Amino acid sequence: MTHTLHRQGSVESLKQDYTVLIADIPFRTYRARLRRKFPGVYIIIKKTLSNVGILKMLRIIERKKPVGAYRQPVFNNKEELTRYLKDLKERNIGKSVVVSGLFDEVNDCLNKLNLSPHTVQFSLGIFGKKELLPKREVLEITTMCGHHMISSRLVEKLTSHIRDGKTTIEEAVGVMNKQCICGVFNKARACKLIEAFAK
């Protein structure tokens, strides 16, 4: 799932950020169900970038709770991730499980559980006119949304409000979290990042 591979930050910061995606039902089956239940929004669904985004998109458009097809928890440390993967292994759920995080850290978790990855994807970084990008501190926050739905200007505005005492760190992170349609925004890590950025 490339939409979780573009997170930025120091190694120490990224050691507090792991996402897991589990496909509960095949997308082909899910798509057929959606076409029957929501025929009017299928054209929009086809244009979305990921299946996780589809679930949130339906919620926005239809104002109804969508049929769950994906679970995507976010963990703040390797120990929690290892416990979660151990539980999945013991239950033998028979589903596709995708883990994103620092390669060495994720690989260490898998080795402890005697698991090996089926496929490994790497992010090659950013190419092009990097001088046009927002500040590094801002990108560390905005890249935690897989579809980059958290605006860099929103982050800068909320950071300014924190400095001026108009809002708290938790409230600001809550506003950012609402923008993330894929649900992979790490609120705990975001609180630490924006606190440092606001100083």
Image: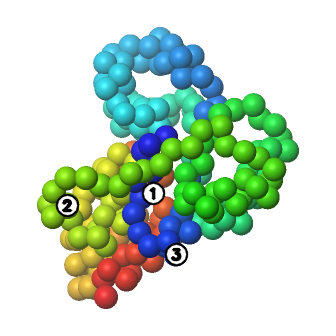
Q: In the rendered structure, which disc, 3 or 1, sits on the residue that comes first in sequence?
A: 3
Q: Neighbour class for label 3 at 10 Å: few (<14), some, many (≥20)?
A: few
**Amino acid of disc 1:** Phe
Badge 1 element: loop
Amino acid of disc 2: Lys
Query: What whole-number distance in Å separates the C-alpha atoms at marks 2 and 1?
Result: 23 Å
Question: Residue at position x 23%, y 70% from top?
Answer: 135
- On residue 130, which mark appears? 2
Identify the residue under disc 3.
12
Residue at 42% x, 45% y is 3
Q: Inspect the image, locate mark 3, and give the three-letter code of the amino acid beneath it.
A: Glu
Q: Is residue 100 above or below residue 190?
A: above
Q: Position of residue 158 (x, y in %)?
A: 26, 71
- Residue furthest to the bottom in view is 199
Q: Residues within 10 Å of mark 2 (few under 14, many from 20)?
A: few
Q: Which numbered disc flags the more N-terminal residue, 2 or 3?
A: 3
Note whether residue 59 is visible.
no
Q: Secondary structure at mark 2?
A: helix
- In the picture, the quarter occupied by the C terminus is bottom left
Q: CA distance from mark 2 to mark 3?
A: 23 Å
Q: Closer to the camera, 68 or 147?
A: 147
**Left or right of residue 8, residue 23 in this image:** right
Distance (Cα) linking label 3 and label 1: 17 Å
Q: Nearer the viewer, residue 155 or 41?
A: 155
Which residue lies under the disc numbered 1? 185
SS at circle 3: helix
Asked whether the residues under the numbered discs 2 and 1 touch, taking CB atoms below 8 Å apart as contact, a structural biologist would say no
Front label number (2 vs 1): 2
Q: Which mark is residue 118?
A: none
